[in-house]
């Protein structure tokens, strides 16, 4: 039940293929050379890109490999058009194909009077989703064995450690009701960190598990905004605790600033993990954006929160959690307005205003040096081209410029992401009844989801503001915020209300998320977290490695929990 294939087929070494690769054997019935151009289904509004020249009677020289992870379109030309072929060029034939991993395909070009092409399957590809069935069965067996073993251990053990009710990151004061302390918050955070470790380990190399090339929303694109959201949830809980202990605001501000500074510095150090070359050091990153967004939202909440508001109507009293943050909403509205005005009205040099595509060969190479529009330009000017991320996915799919998905200008909508979490935290603090929380979490999820859908016109590439993690677009904030509300709702109902799930095993990871994040980054290429056995060219092997890494770090989180070791910046 894994994607296995025999090694040789018609003299071709199938084991030399990588993940999601296939062989194409081209044959020409004639004396003329032809040129194969292709386009990936992922490349939006792109020209066809030259694959290779096909010569008559060239034998094995006409056999080539293709990345077949996405649907491909092909055009065959009888002349060399250079790197790209545009729609106004005449072609011999055109066709689309869904090719598969480890498949072998025969491309025949008949150079007769009519001239036609055919693509036939010589060897069927493997089923790349069989590993899910295999791993599901293994997990089921292991879970059953471990559950039975733990029950037996607990029966014979005289010293059983009770599970702590909540994370030390959200410790309430004696003045706070214990209802605020939700296990679902730590579980949410644990789900995010475990998913992050899994996708950072490759996620089995499935395209939908990795980050979207440019527009779109894949599994890996959910992790970062969920972390920011849950950080926002904890901000009002933490600040209320400190204010309740009569800690001066200036001291709270100093603590906030120090925590933000620590996050920024840790992120900067992690960026130098492959060698601290100062001339090429990436200045921004995940933790740096954490630090910036945390500082801004914490300062806003610390100085603009209004606890006592005189309310007359029932509608106002039902929405007290929103009204207490009315100053926050005004400030966030100003920030979002400034962001949108710059985004749509200020053009990057040589680029149109309102352009936020990947550049390169997007729009038929109309704006090749406009990757990210004004967002990318601001980051390149302020940070310097050598100090931003050099290997975005768009660089390889669209032939785009370097672009930092965690750059400086994108911090503005990221601040909104954290603020949505803060609003959720106020919801939890203000409304203590289960029904009220469920209704409001559901309402926020629906409203944000609809707003995100309207902004992107419920399409991937053709809306006003497409869902785009690279740019941290407004529709991306709304969509991932909606999913965050729904995920927290599910955790809240299952864990804190119905109590049919304890939150394990994610609960432990949520209590030491920063240790796991830094640890999995530092030890990314080391045993026992990562390993290479054989060719590692199947989804099954890569999925096993990614799962092993995630499970091992979760085991470390459990060990830290048992030892009562908790660390937060």
Image (cartoon, rainbow, N blue to C red):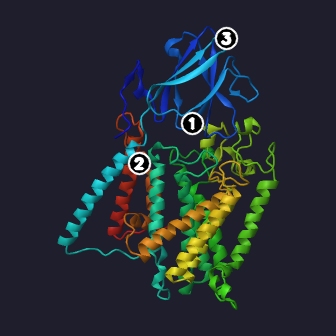
Can residue 226 be seen by looking at this rendering? yes
Q: Nearer the viewer, mark 1 or mark 2?
A: 1
Res. 36 image quadrant = top right
* Disc assigned to residue 113: 3
Q: Is residue 78 above or below residue 319?
A: above
Within 10 Å of disc 1 (Cα), the crowding (few <14, some 14-19, many 20+) is some
Query: Of residues 544 and 436, which is closer to you in this image?
Result: 436
* Disc assigned to residue 256: none
Which of the two labelled residues, at mark 1 and mark 2, occupies the earlier sequence position?
Answer: 1
Which of the two labelled residues, at mark 2 and mark 3, occupies the earlier sequence position?
Answer: 3
Query: Of residues 189 and 84, which is closer to you in this image?
Result: 84
* Number of numbered callouts drawn: 3
The residue at 65%/63% (across/down) is: 450
219 sits left or right of 394 in the view:
left
The image position of residue 183, as x and y in percent, is 43, 73
The residue at 32%/53% (across/down) is: 139
The image position of residue 466, as x and y in percent, is 68, 52
Res. 255 image quadrant = bottom right
The residue at 71%/69% (across/down) is: 332
Q: Identify residue for label 2.
A: 546
Under tag 1, what secondary structure? loop
Which part of the image, by quadrant, shows the N terminus?
top left
Q: Distance between the Cα atoms at labels 3 and 1?
A: 30 Å
Q: Distance between the Cα atoms at labels 2 and 3?
A: 53 Å
Q: Is residue 463 above or below residue 367?
A: below
Q: Nearer the viewer, mark 2 or mark 3?
A: 3
Q: Identify residue for label 1.
A: 71
Q: Distance between the Cα atoms at labels 1 and 2?
A: 25 Å
Can residue 415 be seen by looking at this rendering? no
The image position of residue 228, as x and y in percent, is 57, 64
Tags 3 and 1 in contact by the CB under 8 Å rule?
Answer: no
């Amino acid at each position: 039940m894994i994607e296995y294939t025999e090694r040789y087929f018609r003299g071709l070494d199938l084991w030399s293929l990588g993940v999601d690769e296939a062989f194409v054997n081209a044959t020409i019935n004639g004396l003329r050379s032809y040129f194969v151009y292709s386009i990936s289904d992922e490349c939006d509004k792109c020209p066809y890109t030259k694959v290779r020249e096909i010569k008559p009677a060239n034998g094995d020289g006409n056999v080539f490999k293709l990345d077949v992870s996405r649907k491909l379109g092909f055009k065959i030309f009888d002349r060399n058009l250079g790197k790209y072929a545009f729609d106004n060029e005449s072609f011999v034939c055109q066709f689309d194909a869904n090719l598969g991993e480890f498949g072998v395909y025969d491309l025949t070009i008949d150079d007769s009077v009519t001239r036609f092409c055919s693509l036939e399957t010589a060897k069927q590809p493997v089923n790349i989703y069989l590993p899910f069935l295999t791993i599901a069965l293994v997990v089921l067996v292991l879970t059953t064995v471990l559950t039975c073993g733990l029950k037996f251990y607990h029966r014979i053990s005289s010293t059983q450690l009770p599970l702590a009710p909540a994370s030390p990151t959200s410790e309430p004061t004696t003045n706070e009701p214990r209802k605020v302390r939700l296990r679902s918050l730590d579980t949410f955070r644990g789900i995010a960190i475990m998913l992050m470790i899994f996708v950072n380990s490759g996620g089995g190399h499935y395209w939908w598990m990795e980050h979207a090339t440019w527009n779109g929303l894949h599994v890996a694109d959910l992790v970062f905004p969920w972390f920011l959201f849950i950080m926002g949830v904890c901000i009002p809980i933490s600040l209320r605790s400190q204010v309740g202990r009569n800690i001066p605001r200036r001291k709270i501000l100093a603590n906030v600033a120090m925590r933000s500074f620590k996050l920024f510095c840790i992120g900067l150090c992690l960026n130098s993990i492959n060698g601290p070359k100062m001339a090429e050091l990436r200045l921004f990153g995940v933790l740096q954006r954490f630090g910036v967004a945390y500082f801004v939202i914490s300062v806003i909440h610390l100085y603009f929160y209004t606890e006592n508001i005189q309310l007359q109507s029932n509608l106002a009293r039902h929405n007290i959690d929103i009204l207490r943050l009315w100053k926050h909403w005004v400030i966030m509205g100003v920030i979002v307005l400034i962001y949108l005005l710059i985004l749509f009205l200020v053009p990057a040099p040589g680029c149109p205003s309102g352009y936020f595509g990947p550049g390169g060969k997007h729009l038929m190479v109309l704006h090749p040096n406009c990757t990210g529009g004004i967002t990318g330009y601001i980051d390149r000017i302020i940070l310097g081209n050598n100090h931003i991320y050099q290997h975005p996915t768009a660089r390889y799919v669209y032939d785009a410029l370097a672009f930092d998905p965690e750059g400086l200008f994108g911090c503005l909508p990221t601040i909104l992401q954290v603020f949505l979490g803060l609003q959720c935290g106020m919801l939890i603090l203000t409304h203590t009844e289960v029904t009220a929380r469920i209704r409001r979490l559901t309402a926020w999820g629906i409203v944000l989801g609809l707003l995100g859908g309207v902004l992107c016109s419920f399409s991937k590439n053709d809306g006003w503001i497409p869902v785009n993690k690279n740019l941290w677009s407004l529709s991306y904030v709304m969509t991932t915020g909606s999913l965050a509300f729904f995920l927290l709702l599910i955790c809240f109902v299952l864990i804190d209300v119905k109590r049919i799930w304890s939150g394990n095993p994610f609960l432990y990871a949520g209590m030491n998320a920063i240790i796991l994040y830094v640890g999995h980054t530092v030890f990314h290429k080391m045993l026992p977290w990562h390993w290479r056995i054989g060719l590692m060219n199947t989804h099954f092997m890569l999925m096993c490695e990614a799962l092993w890494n995630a499970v091992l770090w979760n085991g470390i989180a459990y060990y830290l929990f048992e030892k009562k070791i908790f660390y937060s910046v």
